[in-house]
């Protein structure tokens, strides 16, 4: 096993020291003990606390900004051509004033969760009608 040179060891020590310092620095900014003089009126105490907290929070957020949201990978909408007829049938019944429970028992006979399934099909039909059909081309 090859041994590390003095330079490599020094670099590792320096790196470890930097990480420790960064961790302690972040903790110093992240946590704060607030001292208040309770002989002051409550409105003054609240104003002081609010001002101090907002300044500290702003300092922390500028020092450690939140990373951007990662891009969503592969947001693919499943095209279920075989169910479009049912979607539109549920839509038509709902437009006629039927309840989701009645639609579920009519369209999805002898199946479990008919009311929720009717709601889901109604939402799918709405997405389809409001522009989802454009994805078919």
Image: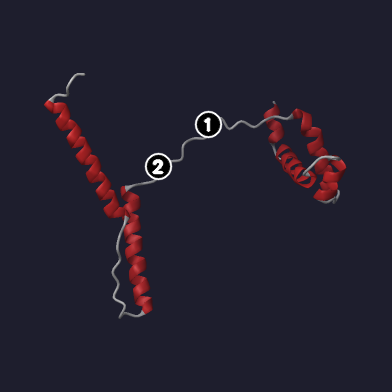
* Residue underneath mark 1: 73
Q: Quadrant of residue 89?
A: top right
Image point 40% across, 42% down: which residue? 67
Residue 8: image x %, image y %? Answer: 17, 27
What coloring was used for the rendering? secondary structure
Q: Are marks 2 and 1 in contact (CB under 8 Å)?
A: no
Please, which residue is most extreme toward the left here?
6
Name the image quarter holding residue 105.
Answer: top right
Q: Position of residue 114 (x, y in %)?
A: 80, 44
Residue extending furthest front?
1
Q: CA distance from mark 2 to mark 1?
A: 17 Å
Query: Residue at coordinates 21% horizontally, 18% vertically from top-left?
Result: 1
Residue tagged 2: 67
Q: Is residue 128 left or right of residue 39?
A: right
Provide residue 57's location: percent of width, then percent of height. 35, 57
What kind of element bears circle 2? loop
* Above or below: residue 34 compared with residue 133: below
**In terms of secondary structure, where does tag 1 sit?**
loop
Position of residue 7 in the picture relative to residue 110 (left or right): left
Disc 1 crowd rating (10 Å Cα; few below 14, some 14-19, many 20+) is few
Quadrant containing the C terminus is top right
Q: Specify which label sits upstream in the sequence, 2 or 1.
A: 2
Residue at image location 34% in from the left, 74% down from the top = 45
């Amino acid at each position: 096993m090859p041994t590390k040179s003095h330079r490599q060891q020094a670099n590792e020590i320096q790196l470890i020291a930097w990480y420790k310092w960064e961790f302690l620095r972040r903790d110093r900014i992240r946590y704060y003990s607030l001292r208040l003089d309770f002989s002051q009126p409550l409105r003054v105490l609240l104003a002081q606390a609010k001002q101090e907290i907002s300044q500290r929070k702003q300092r922390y957020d500028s020092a450690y900004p939140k990373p951007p949201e990662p891009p969503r990978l592969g947001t693919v909408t499943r095209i279920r051509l075989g169910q479009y007829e049912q979607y539109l049938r549920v839509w038509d019944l709902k437009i006629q004033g039927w309840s989701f429970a009645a639609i579920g028992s009519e369209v999805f006979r002898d199946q479990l969760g008919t009311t929720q399934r009717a709601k889901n099909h109604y939402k799918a039909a709405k997405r389809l009608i409001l522009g989802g059909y454009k994805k078919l081309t």
